[in-house]
Image: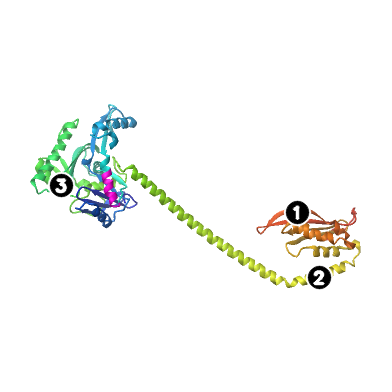
Amino acid sequence: MARSESTISVLQLDERAIRHARFAVVEGLPGLERSVASDMGDCAALRAFAAEGEVPEHEFTTVIPRHQATLRILTLPSREPAEIASMVSLAAEELAPYPRDQLVVKHRILSALESGESRVLVILLHQGVIQQLVERFSVAGLEPKHIFFSTACLHALACAASDAPTGRYALACVSADAVEVLVIDNGILEFSRGVAHHGPWNLEERADRDALGYEVRDALAAWRRESDAGEALERLYVAGDGMDAGLLANVLESVTGKPCVPARFMEESPGGELRVPCGEPIVARGAALTALCCAPLSFDFIPSTILHARSVREVQTGLRRVALFAALVLGLILVAFGQSVYQRVALIQELRSQIDSMAPGVDDIVARQRGLQAIAQQVEQGGNFLALLAAVAEAAPEEGLNITRLEYDRETGMNVWGRARTKDLVLGDFLGRLRQMGEGSLAQLAQAHSQYETAGQERGQNIVNYHIAIPALSEEPSHDAPAPVR
């Protein structure tokens, strides 16, 4: 991955080769785990190389070399970021031989001058360079997460080194088919130039050695012409991107006549990491530092189309996770519902078994009611409590209604409270039967009436609470009547 919790992959392409470096993050710094290269750069080779090297399809970093871009360091008469951005945009067509709409322009403020001006690093890159790189990856089924710039990567690595030279110094980084020269002054980039070679450097050939020396000398002469100091740099530090820095330093010293020293500070890394005999992947290490947000200068040329596609993938991934979570919740709800249904079915079966066990006693209850009715017929009109009780018991429906409280007073009559499943059971069945029985000694039953019916709930079911009054035949009760019988 280009950046994860523990690893960073950097995949670099040129015309004839592919290079992959994987770093483990150790104490916030990239430690090299793997460094491999292939001399074939076509699509099939890239796909096979990525599969063999376990390069993640969408989580890797790549680097654009210095020689493919235009770089300028300008002195602009402002310190305001918005004004500087406007000035850079206006000057873009003058700095590069392309129309403004074909350029990708990025800039960073290097330093603020005492005169109120600013030194600004400007990088101009043709869109076709980025598009060609992205298409090479796309054909192989790959998509970079970051596209960094080699100058910024080298600068990041030099600034991160604890034993980097102080003051102003020159750094030449030689890769397989290019060379880049930087001038750094106390951590601030002052100059950068990159030149591509027609093929891999063959340092055993006199022509290649002379060509390398010429490019380095020409770059240092250009810096001397452009710099304010106008002084030559006495020492040159040499780094090899996948090449032996010691050998390069000896070659450049012999062809330039300048003291050249291997830039060993560029190879500083966490202890215990992999060492590459043929040379450290310098640019890739700088890209890993940049991916860890440890670079003073950071330029990411990833196209907006890739950013949009990445956002869509992230949204789709998020939706898939939400759908998976919803399915899990729904499954748990169904399990809980099934358990609830099972418990209710078990409860219903238990209640039915209890009802079946109580059924034989119904006939006995009916017989007792008839006996009470016969006894009640023998009671005088003033003491007909048993007759009324028997009538209430007989009039009550067998199902759907119960009596929870009964109160009798000789002077005022009888009051019945209870619960029923529906209002019709109270007003239709129960009260209707009582009134039909209101003849003879039980004439007061004809005056039975409802005091109230209120809705309620019991065990999750709707019920009706009722109160039925059966007044005594005497309209005015005496004040010394005995206490009611309950």
Location of residue 387 in the rendering, given as x and y in whole percent from the top left corner? 86, 64
Q: Would you name the residue on which mark 3 appears?
A: 199
* Quarter of the rendering occupied by the C terminus: bottom right
Q: Earlier in the sequence, mark 3 or mark 2?
A: 3
Highlighted range, magenta: 131-141
Check disc 3: other Cα within 10 Å, few if <14, some if 14-19, many if 20+: few
Q: Earlier in the sequence, mark 1 or mark 2?
A: 2
Res. 100 image quadrant: top left
Residue type at tag 1 = Glu
Location of residue 238 in the rendering, given as x and y in whole percent from the top left corner? 17, 44
Picture layout, residue 99 above or below residue 54: above
Q: Residue 453 shows which numbered tag?
A: 1
- Residue 135, magenta (yes or no): yes
In the image, 317 versus 128, the foreground residue is 128
Location of residue 229 in the rendering, given as x and y in whole percent from the top left corner? 18, 31
Q: Residue 368 shows which numbered tag?
A: 2
Q: Residue at x 78, y 72 (%)?
A: 364
Q: Secondary structure at mark 3?
A: loop
Picture layout, residue 86 above or below residue 439: above
